[in-house]
Image: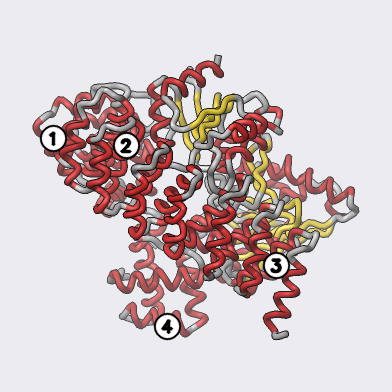
């Protein structure tokens, strides 16, 4: 017996120990050894009663690049135990690309749950070799599988799926499936989908409109942005529309400014949202007003500097910096609060904000520790 | 001092070097900070070109150490995250100690990983002195480790500014510190419970042999690490703990995205993660 | 005061759609992507009801429900399972683990809201 075989024999024994710490250690080491016998032992350890052992076994299996690992994990998908199925799914997803074809073959399985798992995994692996298989799965007789196929195509973001997804919408299938198809088209961002999505915006079904709002936020065609502004006046869609507009404002502020120039009354509506108690709404409104450089919003934004939620306070300060970089509208009592916020903002993701925050701190006579060192 | 800007290429060089060597990940937002630190070190060593400095930290262990010390920011103070420490002191520590008393095994081994200038391990020592009546009959080992040699020096000195002790309850300040007009020094009875050592959390060989801890504190450290490094560190921490031991991350940090091995336990004053 | 609901599902689409349905019906909604995240949120804040899927990574829905039901404080927390598994034995497993209601995906929004309201009364 050579060195590796000896090692393996020892580890195999260790994997049967009564002590879970030993079994866990065995799992770690089998991951390093990477031999064929080890795969079998690790699959057993994957079903260990102790969570830490299972986790170590999962980590080890991810490291072993062997065909039988994929096959054995697929067989675990049929387990009665929920946690075993879920572990197998997690590991297959981490193995990723190499498992695509094996997983795609599951789309023919008799069991609709297996077919659904296959769609989910392919979507999370995000490899476009799966696109063709998933397009076929759009016609699956079971609604959950078809929806999962849509979701997966959206995650993979392969434009070759656009046509098939548009067909799902025009064939007026189930409303859930339509929602999933809309969302997927949004993620794929193919402008070819604009026409059919704009047509769908006259639907009366709130769920479909909600899905459209999100998709419009991804594609950001100017007609879509205009539509989003219209939906600000229609609860329950208004907070979703506001959130989407805020996201657009971060990525494509010129589109927001273009519409607001033609429809300044919308600013009044957005300012109204600054008083909404629902979490997230104030933050989104503040963001939009900052991008719009709305001077009328300054006193309301100053009030938000006292908000309980940290992100809202930060957003309000960012907006103030954009509208009024010298913070002239800031009353004396708010200055200490402002300082703390500015010291956080010098590390913001946005370089413009970092610069504005630095300048403001300098202007107000405060310097952060790191800057003055 | 003039701050030298780094090209994207050079920034990525330094970024991946730091990440590989320490686990810490400096994202785009911290570019200016990194530039200022590198410029400062370069001025100290009389260099003009970032590439030269890059070569230096790759080959000169001492400069590497100085560099690391300069980029790790000490942001700590005594009794940081008071509610979590309250939960530790009033709910978890008594639980663990009672179990140990029943087993006649009165030892406590605690690790403050990423202890920076030492406030955290000394805080833990104070808590033990306050909460464990018969502490004198216990064998206590509090280990504070960090990757900054400069910070470790400050740990040994145990002298702190008023800012560091702002959250220390008044009675404790009198009982456990010697105060002068400018600073506070930790008293010997606290100091002797704690020892310090240089330790790099992404050094696999060293992490692998850490065992037998009842508590591990690693608060607001992993937030600077990248995801894969954090996962690895947490996995080693699991092995380093005794059964029934607890790990403490910062209150806003979540272990669940890094590991499912720990048991989430609910206490009156907060949540904690335990090795079953 | 608005009642608050925690929606637990690993699919971002489901989380978004169910949140929208429940928010439109007047509830405050927060979400979690798996069982452990759900527990972390539940332990930090009070929720009046949980809507959860079963198949999720890191900790599945059944395990999460089992852990909750073992604790006095969560014994009576209303929990609705919304999952893709429609076999009778799956339903039995779910109810045995401690769920109050077992719904199969895709769930009609009206059905979901009706069950939520029924459990909260």
Q: Residue at x 40, y 83 (%)?
A: B55
Marks 1 and 2 belong to one chain: yes
Q: Are marks 1 and 4 in contact (CB under 8 Å)?
A: no
Mark 2, mark 3: which one is toward the viewer? 3
The residue at which mark 3 appears reads as A26
Name the residue nearer the viewer: B152 or A118. Answer: A118
Q: Are marks 2 and 3 in contact (CB under 8 Å)?
A: no
Asked whether the viewer can see residue B147, the reply is no
Indicate the position of residue A301 as horizontal and vertical percent values: 29, 32
Marks 2 and 4 belong to one chain: no
Q: Report the chain holding disc 3.
A: A
Mark 1, mark 3: which one is toward the viewer? 3
Label 1 to label 2: alpha-carbon separation: 22 Å
Q: Secondary structure at mark 2?
A: helix
The residue at which mark 1 appears reads as A259
Q: Report the chain holding disc 1.
A: A
Label 1 to label 4: alpha-carbon separation: 54 Å
The residue at which mark 4 appears reads as B56
Q: Classify B6 as above or below B74.
A: below
Q: Earlier in the sequence, mark 1 or mark 2?
A: 1
Q: Earlier in the sequence, mark 2 or mark 3?
A: 3
Q: Secondary structure at mark 3?
A: helix
Q: Residue at x 41, y 53 (%)?
A: A122
Label 2 to label 3: alpha-carbon separation: 53 Å
Q: Report the chain holding disc 2.
A: A
Indicate the position of residue A345 as horizontal and vertical percent values: 35, 48
The residue at which mark 2 appears reads as A316
**A55 with respect to A206 (left or right):** right
Label 1 to label 3: alpha-carbon separation: 63 Å
């Amino acid at each position: 017996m050579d060195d590796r075989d000896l090692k393996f024999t020892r580890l195999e024994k260790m994997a049967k120990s009564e002590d879970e710490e030993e079994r866990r250690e065995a799992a770690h080491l089998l991951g390093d050894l990477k031999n064929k016998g080890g795969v079998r032992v690790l699959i057993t350890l994957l079903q260990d009663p102790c969570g830490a052992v299972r986790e170590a076994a999962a980590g080890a299996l991810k490291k072993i690049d062997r065909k039988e690992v994929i096959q054995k994990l697929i067989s675990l998908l049929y387990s009665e135990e929920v946690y075993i199925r879920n572990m197998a799914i997690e590991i297959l997803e981490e193995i990723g690309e190499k498992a695509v074809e094996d997983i795609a073959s599951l789309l023919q399985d008799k069991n609709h749950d297996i077919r659904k798992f296959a769609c989910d995994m392919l979507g999370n692996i995000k490899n476009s070799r799966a696109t063709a298989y998933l397009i076929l799965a759009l016609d699956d007789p079971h609604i959950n599988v078809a929806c999962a196929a849509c979701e997966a195509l959206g995650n993979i973001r392969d434009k070759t799926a656009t046509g098939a997804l548009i067909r799902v919408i025009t064939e007026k299938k189930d409303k859930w499936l339509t929602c999933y198809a809309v969302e997927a088209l949004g993620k794929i961002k193919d402008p070819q989908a604009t026409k059919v999505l704009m047509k769908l915006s006259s639907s009366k079904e709130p769920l479909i409109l909600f899905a459209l709002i999100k998709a419009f936020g991804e594609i950001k065609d100017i007609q879509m942005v205009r539509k989003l502004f219209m939906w600000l006046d229609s609860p329950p869609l208004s907070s979703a529309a506001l959130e989407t507009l805020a996201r657009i404002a971060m990525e494509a502020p010129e589109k927001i400014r273009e519409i607001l120039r033609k429809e300044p009354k919308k600013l009044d509506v957005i300012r109204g949202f600054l008083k909404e108690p629902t979490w997230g709404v104030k933050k989104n409104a503040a963001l939009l007003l900052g991008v719009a450089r709305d001077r009328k919003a300054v006193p309301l934004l100053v009030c938000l500097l006292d908000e309980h939620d940290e992100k809202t306070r930060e957003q309000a300060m960012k907006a103030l910096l954009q509208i009024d970089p010298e913070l002239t509208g800031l009353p004396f009592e708010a200055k200490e609060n402002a300082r703390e916020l500015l010291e956080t903002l010098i590390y913001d993701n946005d370089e413009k904000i970092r610069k504005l925050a630095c300048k403001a701190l300098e202007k107000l006579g405060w310097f952060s520790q790191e800057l003055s060192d | 001092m003039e701050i030298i800007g780094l090209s994207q290429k050079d920034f990525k060089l330094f970024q991946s070097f730091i990440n590989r060597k320490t686990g810490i990940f400096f994202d785009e937002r911290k570019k200016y900070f990194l530039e200022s630190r590198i410029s400062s070190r370069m001025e100290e060593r009389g260099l003009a070109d970032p590439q030269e400095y890059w070569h230096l930290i790759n080959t000169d262990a001492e400069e590497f150490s100085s560099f690391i010390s300069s980029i790790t920011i000490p942001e700590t103070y005594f009794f940081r995250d008071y509610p979590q420490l309250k939960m530790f002191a009033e709910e978890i520590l008594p639980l663990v100690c009672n179990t140990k008393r029943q087993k006649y095994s009165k030892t406590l081994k605690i690790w403050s990983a990423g202890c920076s200038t030492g406030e955290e391990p000394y805080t833990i020592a104070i808590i033990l002195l306050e909460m464990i009546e018969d502490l004198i009959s216990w064998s206590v080992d509090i280990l504070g480790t960090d990757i900054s040699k400069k910070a470790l020096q400050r740990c040994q000195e145990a002298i702190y500014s008023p800012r560091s002790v702002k959250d220390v309850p008044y009675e404790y300040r009198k009982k456990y510190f010697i105060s002068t007009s400018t600073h506070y020094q930790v008293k010997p009875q606290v100091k002797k419970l704690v020892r310090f050592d240089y330790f790099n959390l992404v050094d696999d060989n060293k992490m692998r042999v850490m065992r037998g801890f009842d508590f591990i504190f690693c608060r607001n450290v992993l937030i600077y690490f990248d995801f894969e490094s954090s996962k690895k560190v947490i996995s080693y921490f699991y092995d380093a703990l005794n059964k029934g031991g607890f790990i403490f991350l910062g209150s806003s940090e979540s272990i669940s995205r890094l590991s499912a091995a720990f048991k989430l336990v609910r206490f009156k004053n907060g949540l904690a993660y335990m090795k079953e | 005061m608005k009642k608050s609901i925690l929606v637990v599902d690993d699919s971002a689409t489901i989380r978004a759609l169910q949140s929208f349905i429940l928010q439109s019906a007047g509830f405050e909604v927060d979400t979690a992507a798996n069982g452990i995240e759900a527990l972390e949120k539940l332990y930090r804040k009070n929720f009046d009801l949980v809507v959860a899927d079963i198949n999720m990574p890191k900790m599945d829905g059944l395990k999460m429900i089992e852990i909750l039901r073992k604790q006095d404080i969560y014994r009576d927390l209303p929990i609705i399972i919304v999952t893709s598994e429609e076999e009778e034995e799956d339903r039995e497993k779910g109810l045995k683990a401690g769920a109050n209601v077992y719904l199969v995906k895709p769930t009609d929004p009206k059905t979901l809201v009706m069950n939520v309201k029924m459990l909260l009364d």
